[in-house]
Every structure is written in C-alpha cells, then in structure tokens.
Amino acid sequence: MNDVQSPATGAFQTPVTCRLCGSTDQIRKTQFTQLYSQYQKPYHRVDWWQCSTCKGMFAYPVPDIGTIIDHWKTINYNRAEDVPELHNARQRMLGLALADLRRRRVCGKILDIGSNYGYFLQEAAADGWTGFGFDPCDQGVARTRELGFDTRQGWELLEAGYPDHAFDAVTSFDAFCYVWHPYETLQEIRRILKPGGAVLMRLTNKRHIAQWTAQRMDPGERLNMKMTTLLQNQFHSIAIDDLCSVLRRLGFFRFRIIRRASTAPWSRMDRRSLIAYFGAESLYYLSLGRLNVSPGVIVSAQLNPGESD
Ligand SMILES: [Zn+2]
C-alpha cells in the first residue's frame, strides 16, 4: 500500500479493503485525483485507488453529503419528459431491461435503487410488477410517491431497513457507480432478494478506458481533468467481467450481458460516443467476446431458486 504524503490533501487516508470486491490485497493509489466540482467553491479533490484483485478503481474517501449536494448544484438536470428524444432512448433501454426480466420468468415485487422520478417503476408496473423505490433526492422521491410507489429516501441501501428476501427483483439504472459501499450494497441486494430473484443493473463501462488513459499520461492537473471528464461524478468503476465474478461469488448465476444499452438516441449521439460504441463492438468480436468495452451495458443475473441463506 502507498503511504505517500500529498501536498494538496495532506496525508492520504488509505483504504483497508477494496470497495468493490472486499479484498484486502494490494490496494494502490492511482496516478490521478478526481476534481469534484463545487457550487461557487474550488474543486473538492478525491483520491482514487485500484485493487489488484478485481482491477476495480474507486474513490476513497468519498465526499461527505454536503460536498455531494454542493456538486449537484453545479449540474443542470433535465427531467426526461422535457427532452423527448432522450426520454425515448431511455425508455428503449428500460424496455430491454423489462424484456430480460420477462425472459427470466420472474415477477412480483421490484425495488429500483436510484428510482429517480419513477420512470422505470411506471414501465415495470405496466408489465405487472409491484414497484418500490429508493433514492436520496427529495424531488425524485416525492414524485415517485405521487405515482403511488412505496419509496424510501436514503443514501445507503444498507440503512434502508428492508427485510430479508423482500423482493423478486432489484434494479439499478446508472446509480450503482454512485453508491458509497458498492461491495456491501451487492451483499445487501443478495440479502433482500428472494431465492430465484434477479438483479439487473445498467452500468457505464469505463474501467478499461480509464486505466488505459491513466497509464498513458503523466501525473498532473491535465491527467486529473481528463480522468474527471471521463469518470464524471461516479465513485468507482469495475469491468463487467470482474463485476460478474464478484456477483458469482455472492451466489448469482445465469448472467446476461446486454451491450449497446445506450441512454441516448443514436441519431443524436456525438461522433466520439458513436465511435466508442461501434469501436467497442469491433473489439468485442475481434477478441472473440473476451473484451467488452461497450460504454453502456446492462448486466443481469439470478439467485438459485432453491437457495436461501
Ligand atoms: Zn477489488
């Protein structure tokens, strides 16, 4: 482990375990610092680490709640219905998720972590699910409740207080990369799922490109800015295969990976994003399916129906 002193942040707080897989083996500091923007204040600097077991990269320590809220004030959030083309592309992606759950023949109670304004729960309800929401954001929680979904407000699933085996499916769309304790959150998802229950997550798939970028630039503010732009405001990044290994260890199986799960319409996507998606497809086929760098991916898996801990 690295115990180098940072002139910018003082002594590093070195993580004892990997946030993504729980390993205590060789966690080393990355070459870059995430510049977390703050409303009318200088950047909050976040140290990033990499685990040699799962190759995952993660922020540690994560910013406190006040710092996260100050960051939100710097972002211009669009309600999906205000941008119809984006809304339609997102609905298409949510449709892929529901089709996956239908194929698994699971139905009943579904918990959406990061339920946002309840868009997915509305679609899920139309598909026969009873929806439950969980989100830290006041406005999103209020609207999801108005839509009639039982929604708890909170930052950590671990503190939500759901009973064992409460849900037939747990979903999360672009929210997992913000959770503070990803490994414990995955364990918690497993605990609250019924035997045979399904987990489904839409993820941005940036670990390969983040590592590649970090290795090819000298440390400094240029690299910090490049990585900040790439990672945006997420707190960790793990490759899809490595995430599947972690989930497998927790008892999940029957994995399904949907590549090209974009949330933006192809017709509106900028050239760089199009190249990223279609370049990733070429790499996937050239590597005979071993390298998946598709920018947007849905991962789903299931617990054994006969299994109960
Ligand atoms: Zn790890």
Image: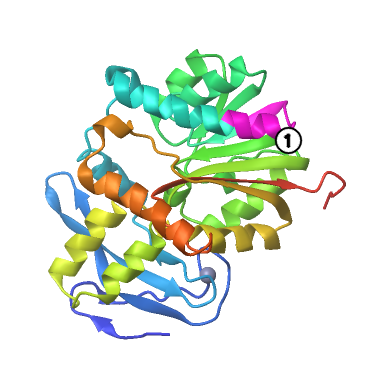
Q: Secondary structure at mark 1?
A: loop
Q: Is residue 86 above or below residue 183?
A: above
The residue at the point 28 percent across, 71 percent down is 214
Task: Name the amino acid type tagged 1.
Answer: Ala
Residue that mark 1 sits on: 166
| Most distant residue in the right direction | 306
Q: Is residue 280 above or below residue 125?
A: below
Q: Is residue 211 above or below residue 114?
A: below
Pinpoint residue 100: horizontal percent, then vertical percent. Answer: 62, 35
The residue at the point 44 percent across, 21 percent down is 142
Pinpoint residue 53: horizontal percent, then vertical percent. Answer: 54, 75
Relative horizontal placement of residue 36, taking residue 99 as reference (left or right): left
Pinpoint residue 128: horizontal percent, then vertical percent. Answer: 67, 18
Relative horizontal placement of residue 41, taking residue 128 as reference (left or right): left
Q: Is residue 61 magenta?
A: no
Residue interval drawn in magenta: 98-110
Relative horizontal placement of residue 309, taking residue 161 as reference (left or right): right
Q: Nearer the viewer, residue 40 or 25?
A: 25
The residue at the point 22 percent across, 40 percent down is 270
